[in-house]
Amino acid sequence: MTFPYRKGPWQVLDSEIKYQNPWITVREDQVIRPDGKDGIFGVVDMLPGVSVLAVDSDGYAYLVKEYQYGVEKETLEVISGGYAEGEERLAAVHRELKEEAGITAEEIISLGRIDPFTSVVNSANYLYLAQGLEFGESEPEGTEVIEIIKVPYQQALAWAMDSTITHGASAATILKARDYLLAEK
């Protein structure tokens, strides 16, 4: 990248990576702000992710309950995970279903994309609905201790609405699935 360059109404004078691991990169940009003043802007680049709501033929949704280190509590979420450069998104969806819940799905329906943290985090998340489910053994990663929670879809929807489910991509996935699932009835 050649400096300076424009980023919308911002001018980027320089950029320095402050921290990096396989999942995130934290950088600090030296900028000229839209008001013309010098400044800095911190950005976290994260691996993109997939979030998938698995719903069986009887209308039950499969959620995961897991301790999340960053927020220091157990959360209730749809099946989610990141995917690395070169991995196809649908392959990541199938991998995450199998890893976290032992689920294989005949049908994967795209529900679109969200950008969960638009101000300082660059991490696209792609949302899916999985149907035609078959169940087997899960294969969690060494960092995961997961409990599968089977509830009627309407209960998952209620939890997304009353903030029992606080994970943004999970709430968005459950809400975006609503019209599709209601149209099937």
Image: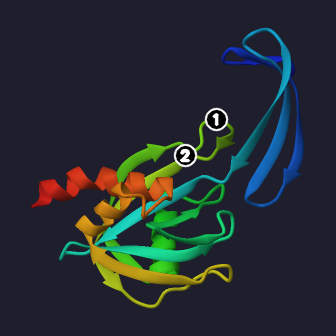
- In this rendering, position of residue 164 left or right of residue 38: left
Q: CA distance from mark 1 to mark 2?
A: 9 Å
Q: Quadrant of the N terminus?
A: top right
Q: Quadrant of residue 165?
A: bottom left
The image's colouring method is: rainbow
List x then y, in percent, for residue 114. 48, 44
Q: Is residue 117 left or right of residue 172?
A: right
* Rendered position, 174 above or below 30: below
Q: Amino acid at mark 2?
A: Pro
Secondary structure under the numbered disc 2 in the rendered image: loop
Q: Which residue is mark 1?
A: 119
- Element assignment for label 1: loop
Q: Taking 128 as reference, is 36 left or right?
A: right
Q: In the displayed structure, does residue 158 sit left or right of residue 23?
A: left
- Badge number at residue 82: none
Three-letter amino acid code at the position of disc 1 = Ser
Disc 2: CA contacts within 10 A as few (<14), some (14-19) or many (>=20) = some
Per the image, the residue denoted by label 2 is 116
Q: Is residue 156 above or below residue 128?
A: below
* Residue 157 spot, x, y in % from top left: 30, 61
Residue drawn at the location 40% of the way across and 51% of the way down:
172
Mark 1: few, some, or many residues within 10 Å (few <14, many ≥20)?
A: few
Residue 164 in the image: state x and y as whole percent.
42, 64
Residue 53 lies, with reference to residue 172, above or below; the image says below
- Residue at 66% over, 69% down: 72
At horizontal 55% and vertical 85% (from top left) the residue drawn is 139
